[in-house]
Image (cartoon, rainbow, N blue to C red):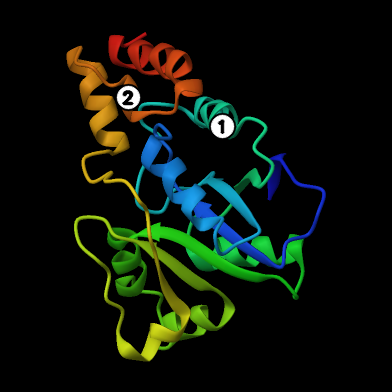
Amino acid sequence: MQFYRSLERSPRRLGIFPGAFNPVTVAHMALASAALSVVDEVLFILPRDLPHKTYAGAAFPGRIAMLRAAIGVRRAYSLASTEGGLFAEIAAECRAVYGEAVRMSFLCGRDVAERVAGWDYGTPDAYAGMLREFGLLVAARQGVYRPPQAYAHAIEPLEIQSDFEGVSATEVRARIARGAEWEMLVPAEVRELAARIYRTASSGY
């Protein structure tokens, strides 16, 4: 794990927020802000190996730069990259850094929670074993996530006050490509940087 911004204090409960962040959006930041009601620190994670996506659009350094801009000097946010991209791999890297005492919870939306639960890990009890190591804080995204009863003890809903259903990194990139308004979908601190990154990428240079 490589840190780009770390906090001096050790959290009792760590919120782990992995993503492709292509780019970081206002919905990402709202989810992180909501998580601070239950965790002491939100760690934004950009995996070097994305298990479900490729590095198209913004390259790794550009995504780190946008995340650093979005996080700014907010005291409870940290930023790192991991070698692995699956939740279990990320959790293992976090555990090695933060120690055995910290309680870890991954932040995600309904779509990601369902994908994690349905992923083929090679053994039938792998998902249950993962939820003994960490929990999930799940925000509604095109519907509320309703976990199987057997796993409900490790999965909590995460309430976000505003409606971000139409906000996604895919929508940001699509709007930039067709010259439509997109700035309101990303944090103000990221707009100038995102404009340079994605307009350059779409031009083919």
Disc marking residue 1: none
Q: Residue furthest bottom?
A: 150
- At x 42% / y 26%, what residue is drawn? 58
The three-letter code of the residue at mark 1 reads: Ile
| Residue 118 vertical position relative to residue 166 in the rendered view, above or below | below
> Residue 90, how many percent across, how many down?
57, 60
> Residue 160, how many percent across, how many down?
37, 53
Please give left or right for residue 2 compared with residue 143 in the image: right
Quadrant housing the C terminus: top left
- At x 55% / y 74%, what residue is drawn? 134
Disc marking residue 184: 2
Q: Categorize mark 1 by other alpha carbons within 10 Å: few (<14), some (14-19), many (20+).
A: many
Q: State which quadrant residue 182 falls in.
A: top left
- The alpha-carbon separation of the residues under discs 1 and 2 comes to 20 Å
> Residue 129, how many percent across, how many down?
51, 84
Helix, strand or loop at disc 1? helix
Between 196 and 84, the residue placed more toward the observer is 196
Please give left or right for residue 178 compared with residue 36 in the image: left
- At x 46% / y 41%, what residue is drawn? 29
Between 123 and 163, the residue placed more toward the observer is 163
Disc marking residue 64: 1
Pick whichever of labels 1 and 2 is earlier in the sequence: 1
Q: Categorize mark 2 by other alpha carbons within 10 Å: few (<14), some (14-19), many (20+).
A: few
| Residue 5 vertical position relative to residue 87 in the rendered view, above or below | above
Between 1 and 133, the residue placed more toward the observer is 133
> Residue 133, how many percent across, how many down?
58, 78
The three-letter code of the residue at mark 2 reads: Met
Helix, strand or loop at disc 2? helix
| Residue 168 vertical position relative to residue 63 in the rendered view, above or below | below
